[in-house]
Amino acid sequence: MTDQPSGLFKKVVGKVKETAGSLAGNQELAREGELEQTQADAERKAAELDATAEQRRSAAEIEATQRENAAERQRLAAEATEAKREAELKRQHTQEERRLEGEFAQREAAVERQKEVQETAADRREEMALEERRQAAAEVAKAERAAQRAETTADVLDAAQEQP
């Protein structure tokens, strides 16, 4: 934009030269004036094109920055989604581990209870077997005593029969 006054000044100088050359009949001065005006117009047009190109470049940079920002937002959103998914998976994993630990503890307790029941049953069977042995031993002792008494009675009877 600083070229504008310079370009305008060149155009005015060219117009003055063209008019002065026409009035004075100096074709060379008139052509020089026309050339300066054409040059000023070309410089103005070039400046406008430069400005337009600069605007387009700036717009392209802004658009590229916006695309980069959008891509970055998408990347960050994807990272956040992934982090949430990983956190959810970790939470589910932890929950499943706790569930399995609880289930294992329940099974272990059930096995322990079953073992205690079996041990108690084995102890009862052992006690019953001991009691049966004691009873059998008592019966044997009773039978032996009865046999002893019967033998003693038989001996007494035999002895009494042998005496006339």
Image (cartoon, rainbow, N blue to C red):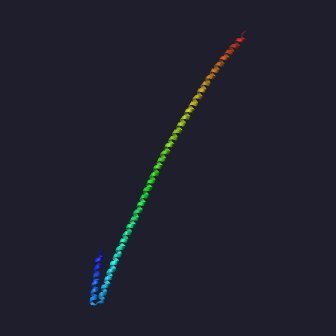
Q: Is residue 102 left or right of residue 158?
A: left
State the residue in front, 115 or 57: 57
Q: Is residue 27 above or below residue 128?
A: below
State the residue in front, 67 or 144: 67
Q: Is residue 113 above or below residue 73?
A: above
State the residue in front, 97 or 154: 97
Q: Is residue 108 above or below residue 44?
A: above
What residue sits 29% from the left and 77% below the top? Answer: 4
What residue sits 40% from the left and 64% below the top? Answer: 68
Residue 16 placement: quadrant: bottom left
Q: Is residue 32 left or right of residue 131?
A: left
Q: Is residue 97 left or right of residue 147?
A: left
What residue sits 33% from the left and 82% below the top? Answer: 39
Residue 40 placement: quadrant: bottom left
| Quadrant, the N terminus | bottom left
Query: Residue 149: where, in percent of width, then height?
Result: 65, 17
What residue sits 67% from the left and 15% below the top? Answer: 153
Q: How many marks?
A: 0
Q: Is residue 162 above or below residue 104?
A: above
Of all residues, the one furthest to the top in this rendering is 164
